[in-house]
Amino acid sequence: MSNNNTTDGEQVRIDKWLWSVRLFKTRSQAAEACQSGRVKMGGVCLKPSHAVRVGERYDISIEQLHKQVEVKQLLHTRVGAKLVDNYLVDLTPEEEYERIRIAREFGFERRDRGIGRPTKRDRREIEDFKYK
């Protein structure tokens, strides 16, 4: 076993594990997500101190994305992006990724370069188109 793994009997907090497998940029962001109810297991919100166990499945809301992951292995330290697949199984449906891709693609207005900022009239037309 590598030194990143835990040995028998050791526990890893959910906030630390989520940060270690790169689902959150910082551990405090992972802890805040737990405290605000965006990390769930079986519909129950988890505290940042929840002990992670192999085989558990978590529902995690990261901005508009709703990920579902299963724990493959425990670890104490952050791992490189290429090694993340050794520690979790991504069970998120492909439709969820497609929904996010479409939202990003069509969520922004495109303007030709060099034509300047929209006028008040342009802005009103854009808002009418987007929200009505």
Image (spheres, helix red, strand yellow):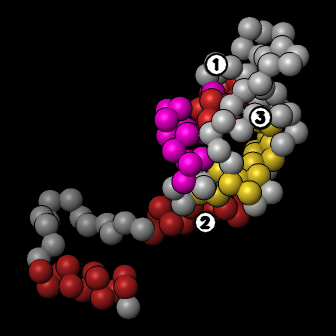
Three-letter code for the amino acid on which mark 3 is drawn:
Val
Q: Is residue 54 visible?
A: yes
In the depicted structure, whether residue 10 falls above or below residue 31: above
**Viewed as shown, does residue 12 lie left or right of 53?**
left
Report the residue marked by disc 3: 52
Q: What is the distance, in whole Å, between disc 1 and disc 2 at their CAs?
A: 32 Å
In the rendered image, residue 130, in percent from the top left (x then y), is placed at 37, 82
Tell me the CA gap for discs 3 and 1.
Answer: 14 Å
The secondary element bearing badge 3 is classed as loop
Mark 3 or mark 2, which has the lower sequence index? Answer: 3
Q: Label 1 amino acid?
A: Thr
Residue 24 rendering spot, x and y as whole percentages: 55, 38
Drawn side of residue 114 relative to residue 52, left or right? left
- The part of the image, by quadrant, that contains residue 115 is bottom left
Q: Classify mark 1: helix, strand or loop.
A: loop
Discs 3, 1 touching: Cβ within 8 Å: no
Mark toward the viewer: 3 or 2: 3
Residue beneath label 1, please? 77
Which mark identifies residue 99?
2
Residues 35 and 79: in front is: 35
Q: Along the horizontal axis of the image, is 44 left or right of 104?
A: right
Sequence-earlier tag: 1 or 2: 1
Relative side of 121 to 29, left or right: left
Q: Which residues are magenta?
A: 20-36
